[in-house]
Amino acid sequence: MAQESENANKNEHGANGIISLEQMINSLKEKDYIATSQKKYRVADPNYEEEQFYFQFLIEFQDKEQWILHSTTSIRDRITEQQWHSEHIKRLNAYVKKAYVVVPDGLNAKERTNAANYNNKIIQKKIYSALDGVIPFETAYRMIEHKAASLMNSGKAHAKLGLHFEEKLVDALNNQQNFDKWKNQSATSVGYLYSLYVDVMKKLCVDSREVLSVKATSDIPKLPSGGTPKTDVLLEINTLNGTLEYSFSCKRSSADRVSVHEYTADAFSRVLNPDDEELRSLLLEFQTAGGVRAMNSESANQLEKHLIKYRDRLCKWVLAGIGGEGEPKVQWASHIITVNENLNEYKISSIDEYIKEYDIQGVTGQLGTPFQWTYPSGGKGKRIQLKGKMI
């Protein structure tokens, strides 16, 4: 009976891995990264009747290139089956350029080592391999994203990658297998982008034993002015002691300065200190001039002296919306996640930690702030635009 139970668990574990891989493919297809996909892909040698060569999934990109993917929760000698199948599928279908065995992100140490060792043998060409790698879910997701992005112009690719991290985060946080695995409620759950889920929960110092449910959304209402709130993803965690709410701003890390804020001089004045009339006058003067150098030098010096006093308040408003318009719990960000797609790295910081990081890294801007001060295209004399580095 014990052996039967163990086999049943192995089968359920394997089935959950296939479900998670299918979820990933469907999610990437919805984002237009994948043109088409096929489950239970089979092909026959033209000299034989039976479709004997099989992979769990085939995906096709916009350029017609195809990859085959196969989920496994354990690396054993039978991986030679996938070697055999992938070699002949590539021989018979010239569009198939890559073949990957995909393993869960949350494997135990032994299985993780087995997978990494086998992958290294392939990469270092220590063995003959028709497989191109044995990779975790996170890596498979990233590789598909970047293959698809390489087919787009750079502007569209960056926009898609930035936007889709928000959806990726929501998918991970709402995944029931992730929740069950994290709560130790299931020994057979594989999860979906599980390491991202765990990293968020660790950062928030949430005790899994106290959590009843987790719900995330990227459907954040517009600000009263019609503008976009700083919050990209809202997370609600129901616990034995009440409901916890967290709000995340998701940003692409960039060495270049990008537009991070745009409001009128009056709005700057209201948020920073509505009673500081000199500040308001200087902000209006800057707005008219459109730049620090275009402004009267004495006025620029005075503005800098004022802004240094309100630096922390300014940073919180610019980065998180704190102190500005909107609903604080929903539209003001409590955390920032910066994403480096090239390195497949992300960093989760509270707003205060992120502002301190500006100082640690020596990020400097203008007027005693970390930001460059300018005006939006066509908005000189009407609005002030700030540009900043996402670190």
Image (cartoon, rainbow, N blue to C red):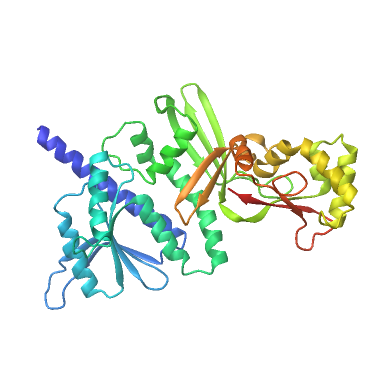
- Left or right of 6, for residue 258: right
Taking 243 as reference, is 363 above or below it?
Answer: below
Identify the residue at image location x=29%, y=70%: 96
Taking 368 as reference, is 291 above or below it?
Answer: below
- Picture coordinates of residue 200, whole percent (x, y): 47, 38
Taking 276 as reference, is 23 above or below it?
Answer: below
- Picture coordinates of residue 39, whole percent (x, y): 29, 60
Residue 326 in sight = no
Q: Quadrant of residue 197?
A: top left
Q: Quadrant of residue 368?
A: top right
Nearest the viewer among 65 and 302 is 302
Residue 38 in sight = yes
Identify the residue at image location x=43%, y=24%: 210
Question: Number of labelled discs?
Answer: 0
- Left or right of 130, for residue 341: right
Taking 184 as reference, is 136 above or below it?
Answer: below
Q: Quadrant of residue 54?
A: bottom left
- Picture coordinates of residue 8, whole percent (x, y): 17, 40
Nearest the viewer among 191 and 276 is 276
- Picture coordinates of residue 125, whole percent (x, y): 23, 62
- Left or right of 324, for residue 124: left
Quarter holding the N terminus is top left
